[in-house]
Amino acid sequence: MNRIHAVPMKHVNIQDGFISRAQRLMRESVIPYQWRALNDSVPGAEKSYCIQNLKIAAGKIKGERGGMVFQDSDLAKWIEAAAYLLQSERDAQLEAHCDEIIDLMAQGQMEDGYFNTYFQLVEPQRRFKDLRDCHELYCCGHFIEAAVAYYEATGKRKLLEIMERMVALIAREFGPGEGQRRGYPGHQEIELALVKLYRTTGKKEYLDLAQFFIDERGREPYYFDLERQQLPNDHFPLNSEFGRAYFQAHLPVRQQQEVVGHSVRAMYMLCGMADVALETGDATLYQACRRLWASTVQKRMYITGAIGSTAYGEAFTFDYHLPNDTIYGETCAAIGLCFFASRMLQFGANREYADILERALYNGVLSGISLDGERFFYVNPLEVWPQETREVHDFKEVKPQRQPWFGCACCPPNLARFISSLGQYAYGYDAHNLYIHLYIGGTLDVTLGDGTLAALRVDSTLPYGGQISIEIRSPGHYGLALRVPGWCQEYTVCVNGEAVKAPVEDGYLYLHRDWMKGDKVTLVLALEPVRMYANAAVHHDAGLVAVQYGPMVYCAEEADNGKDLHNLVLPSGAAIYAEYCENCLGGVMTLKTEGLRREGADDALYTTQPPRFIPQEIRLIPYFAWANRGEGEMRVWLQEK
Amino acid sequence: MNRIHAVPMKHVNIQDGFISRAQRLMRESVIPYQWRALNDSVPGAEKSYCIQNLKIAAGKIKGERGGMVFQDSDLAKWIEAAAYLLQSERDAQLEAHCDEIIDLMAQGQMEDGYFNTYFQLVEPQRRFKDLRDCHELYCCGHFIEAAVAYYEATGKRKLLEIMERMVALIAREFGPGEGQRRGYPGHQEIELALVKLYRTTGKKEYLDLAQFFIDERGREPYYFDLERQQLPNDHFPLNSEFGRAYFQAHLPVRQQQEVVGHSVRAMYMLCGMADVALETGDATLYQACRRLWASTVQKRMYITGAIGSTAYGEAFTFDYHLPNDTIYGETCAAIGLCFFASRMLQFGANREYADILERALYNGVLSGISLDGERFFYVNPLEVWPQETREVHDFKEVKPQRQPWFGCACCPPNLARFISSLGQYAYGYDAHNLYIHLYIGGTLDVTLGDGTLAALRVDSTLPYGGQISIEIRSPGHYGLALRVPGWCQEYTVCVNGEAVKAPVEDGYLYLHRDWMKGDKVTLVLALEPVRMYANAAVHHDAGLVAVQYGPMVYCAEEADNGKDLHNLVLPSGAAIYAEYCENCLGGVMTLKTEGLRREGADDALYTTQPPRFIPQEIRLIPYFAWANRGEGEMRVWLQEK
């Protein structure tokens, strides 16, 4: 394994035509909006209760705790996102809000280190007694991630210390020793968080605890049955209908052959497994990650990078079962897939990981948020018939329009923290090389493993153009490893204007040289609309075609093409033209082609008369930008003729 | 309105190559099997409890009542079916079983006439207090139908009297008068049964009660809310999640514009409405029947005659929403559609009704039972991917194989009573004409309205051949009205070997003459495989084609075509050959064509390489006969190219 480290956020400053807009949205709209949501001051939105619960726990106000059992985690994700924004730009008011929460947490934390508003205020007698369903370790994990990010951003240790006390309590309760319980979280998250805490503090006991949770998962006797024997039957009965696979606890993790169950849990588990394997060099754990990665992206992923084929259990189903309409495709799951991909990239540069990271980011993740940053999708369908989503029970989770907030609002703050920290997913380094995984414009400086300072400025016209130029800003001998995306059939690379030949390994092009300050690397990636076909085993895409342009998957909307998109037909020979539209959806590349529309021969419900096909221009927009022009039909996969 | 009466069963004796087999199955297999099921003596099948409950009510044994609240109705449907068999052929043992049940009912009936094992044994204090959910009037309706049929078959009045006492009690409890309640059944059925009882007894109060229930339905104040205010919250809470439309009580019936809600309830309601309109000449009620008929068959019916697009509420959804895989398509609903069609035919001969009756019978009804008569489908999908039905929650009602019995076993006895009484659906008469709606071979004799005796013998090679010959067995002047099916593009008709021209009105060909004994009418209907297309508004059938041969819809099964039926492609120009296969599925017409199979260009989940198409013979079998050769995929709608 050639360990590649992510370039930490504070060494990256993103300035990118496309991504900076999304990040600005986070800073200017999402984070302030979510702050109001956490404070229950967004009119018409479902109540969050987060700050209110915290104040009750801190003894500041009286009242009844509200929201989901895991409601605290929204707060944690918000702090984490805020911390990333603070890492790139200080903001006194934002920092003050964070400090306010952290102070309340300090006041609310129990003597022995325990912190969780649900169990402190609602069921104190069941602390750590229902790991399967009650998300205590999950919430703790999110607060650990927040604590690490906030410490990195501000140097303030208060939240870190709160969480170290909580972790110490957990480490006394759970473990392989005498008098300890061999439990593990029903919703994975703390594993990856503990590795972050280990990396930040250097305390190996945190890595050990992460590994303990991973090793125990799925062992016999089945822990979730043991703890359930001590609980009343009606304690969170809902999850009892799901089997062990829902929690990825059907087998010890190293024996798992296929990705199964709740898709966000699966991704977070895989991140934790990869993180532990990265730190310990555990080969069987790495092999399990490889296997489950392949199961995910080669058999159970939508073309948008969405995962989770069913709302029931928010779960994976089976190989090649990818319904476009009843999909779950939770925004958080696509984000989880990005997290997992970025971990896998740290085992060695291979574009198979970065390609999926990019696919999920530009499609299934960004679709989760409206262009104005104020509304969110939880479910990200690839085909929507609005009347069906409203009137048919199987579609009750699918919304044809983004929503202002959710009772279970995991996705909006998850989006905020991911988009705000994109810098750390774009670049990597090892002893002698700097890797560019994603072409997001900006500057970075990082000291490679051998002590060489690599400082660059990247300019990129992606995702709508293929011009990438990299300016070297400090001299040094090292390799610059540039990913050639899987969607790119042709490219040219020049150094200081001269075409160069360079070796490509696992999809990365390596330029090794003595770099001088001011050297300029130019990479031109050919971008053109391409037709994509699903594997013939995918029932739901039979006879259908999707269109991609660079990393972007496209879709047809009713706003551009009229109703009954199932009757649009894209002829296999028709040329598809790309046309940038400044005034469309905040500026997007649109695609146009001469297509057909199926028309019935008569009005009968069933007829012997075959349909007619009449010419109709088909106009496509990037998938992430759908549902920003009112309610209407949408389809990614179109009929082909 | 030119009232056409159904020819009563006792005047018809079916001897038909195709239908007699199904009827024999009822007599030799289904009825005896169901008798064992009702007695809980089928190993491995879910317990019925029916006879046991009856014995408890009659004080013969002690024990706890089991089964659904409406479990009694299975018994009623069984008696009704047995009675139809007895009408065509006496059977001492069968009659003894019926008498045994009827004796137990007489012993179990309460002093005041009440009979219902659920309320007698479980909730006596809630008698007639939960009409919405507790099916008392529904069960009563089925016993009335049984009573009428049994009386017609045997002349025995005991069950008729039991039910007249029960109806008298209901008529005291419910009505427009002082001290009566303005209730109506949550599950319609008693309305049509009361009209049958009226026709048998001549007592107009039964017709009036039927009309009362129909008139009250959907009025304000909403009766089901009124009764619910007197019930505890947890009394059958499940149905509370369904709105008024589930019960077709969202509007007074005459104001209803679209067929909605639970599809069996809708069909039974429409039968009751039509029956009342037939007896009273109520024009607005007839118009409502017409409108809701059109809504059903022009917008919300599958090509197999199945209805009910969703398992949630076993209900209709919205116009042109006809998913082939998550369909409900309950066998009982297709039977209900046949009942409704046969009522509409009584307002005047029009093939639009008989065509649908035939479509539903030969496809969505017959598919409900296995070729050996021992297993049943509740849900009748048009597309099955077995792994999906087993592993995906939305498909939990869809079974890839027929089941031996159901806890809610409404469909098997409903099939038995419908198939056993087919004679009464095939023929009709008015003052001067005899109508043949369905070409089912057999003999009949009926006295027309003007007193003329019409006696015929019909021989038919349908559904696999188009040769129909009719022998006149008694002289008389009357019109013979022969339906020309909608699927038939060409036909010839001869009388005594000479081609004749005859007027066709609303799809019926009228031969008026002085018939002589021995006259022979020969009708030859052209049968050939035809491609069928769904209306372009049907999303789920876009780009797909179905194949029909005469009244039979065809399907592809894995047993003949291999897995991945979504990759079969039927070229629009390919000739389709019909080939009778004696040894296939008990003898069926099979269809064959040179088709294609889509194959992926590579193993990637998504690829830029278009699929290849390789030649493959496609073999189709009649839809009703699917799932008789083990578990496998099945599709009615195939991709077209």
Image (spheres, coloured by chain):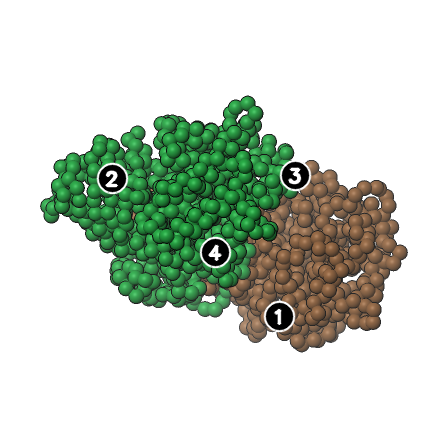
Chain colours: A brown, B green
Q: CA distance from mark 1 to mark 4?
A: 44 Å
Q: Which residue matches tag 4?
A: B37
Which image quadrant for residue B20? bottom left
Asked whether A474 or B382 is in front, the reply is: B382
Which image quadrant for residue B151? top left
Q: Which residue matches tag 2?
A: B446
- 1 or 2: mark nearer the eye: 2
Which image quadrant for residue A216? bottom right
**Host chain of mark 2:** B
Disc number at residue B614?
none
Both labels 3 and 2 in a single chain: yes
Q: Residues within 10 Å of mark 1 (few under 14, many from 20)?
A: some
Give x and y (percent) for residue A580: 51, 49
Residue at the image point whose x is 26% and y is 62% from the top: B579
Both labels 1 and 4 in a single chain: no
**Host chain of mark 4:** B
Disc number at residue B232?
3
Q: Secondary structure at mark 4?
A: helix
Q: CA distance from mark 2 to mark 4?
A: 37 Å
